[in-house]
Amino acid sequence: FKGFGLGIIPGERKGIKIKTLAGPRLNDPPLELYDCHTCGGVYNLGHGNQKIVQILKDALDSGLDIGDHLQLSEWRALLGKKLAELMPPGITKTTFGVSGGEAVDTAIKFSRAYTKRKSCISAIGGYHGHTGFALATGDPGFKENFLWNLPDFEQVPFGDSEALKKTISDDVACVILETIPASGGVLIAPEGYFSEVRELCNDHDVMMIIDEVQTGLGRTGHFWAIYGGLYKQEKVIPDFMVLGKGTSGGVYPISICSYKPFIEKAVFRDDPFIHISTTGGSDLGCVVACEMLDIQSDPEFLNHVKAMGKLFGSGLEEIADDNSELINEVRGRGLMWGLEFKKETLGQLAMLSIIKEGVLQNHCGNRKDTLIMMPPLIVKEEEIEEIMKRIREGVKKIKHLV
């Protein structure tokens, strides 16, 4: 951002807005921005959500802390039970971590332990984190500088079941996919794609890992994107579900790798400490995550996301229709949307112009022609109306460049 003249530092954060400490240039006034970035869903409940903040304060006052990873924990058990009740049927076991990347590493590691195979297939343009196995699943731009082009990791085009069919084999340990690839451009797979992935994995005894770090927890208007959130009638049950970002409630990091019971038996049968995370699944993080799940799994909350998602999507569609010389396509679900421009340069200029109008968003990490917009799930109708006015104005101000 600094290279584009927007070297700003966030100051006060409240609800769905951020105020900067100073303006982008010397003597410029501070900016007030609607947060449609939300760090990929960290702030699903907005900044400083009072219910979440209060429950964290209460937990600290009661004497809770991080806890001891070698001992039993009441709050890990309570959170694990709650997750087992909310997950797609049959996914009942959980290993906790701190970051989404750690949770992805865990899922791949456990897949290798269960299958006794090494290979992993991921999607071109996908992103699963910057650590270990997670980094190995990503695009070259994230890996090459670290000499991290590991053997046994292969990519195929997202949404193309034929390409996967040609690549998968009895030597593959796992297939890992985001339900909606965020860095890849907010891509929407054709209906039936994930069902075909599930079938191919079954045919070869391959573990299916679904990364819902950004799309889960109600982002699509359904609690899980893979289980009715993409297409209402398509409910797919993977072997692993990976969560992060929004599991923090915006205040205390915790990540989740949930899986089917047979996997736990293969991993922990001989040694319960063969996989540990010192601060993963901290008591404080579990308290926060339990409250977050109660809020976001409520049917009224999910109905709100659906309603606001329709408004947000239709607003972007109108802007795209009125600026067809600039914009190729709008795609998304719920409150996760991608706005694809005709060129990378137009996408980046639009990003900056819209920020200057007061809406914080970003281009997709592996698709610079597409802006990704993920407002907090608590956004209201009047706020969406204001956000759309500002996005429209930002797009209008680059129209002369075409």
Image (cartoon, rainbow, N blue to C red):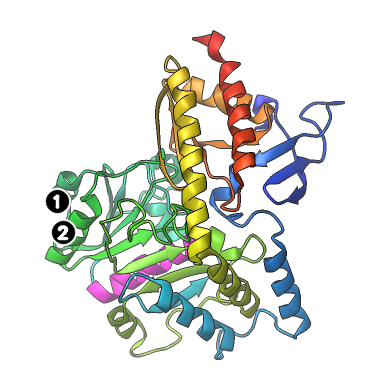
Seen at 56% across and 52% down, the residue is: 377
Residue 145, can we see it? no
- The amino acid type, in three-letter code, at marker 2 is Leu
Q: Give the residue number, with chain letter if any, for mark 2.
A: 200
Measured in 3D between alpha carbons, the distance from the residue under mark 2 to the one under mark 1, in whole angstroms, is 7 Å
- Classify 291 as above or below 15: below
Q: Give coordinates of residue 363: x percent, y percent.
A: 51, 34
Q: Are marks 2 and 1 in contact (CB under 8 Å)?
A: yes
Residue 193 vs 48, above or below: the answer is: above
Stretch of the chain drawn in magenta: 99-115
Taking the magenta stretch, the answer to whether it contains residue 107 is yes
Residue 107: x and y in percent read 37, 67
The answer to whether 123 is drawn above or below residue 228 in the figure is above
Magenta stretch prevailing secondary structure: helix
Q: Which residue is mark 1?
A: 165
Dot 2 or dot 1, earlier in sequence: 1
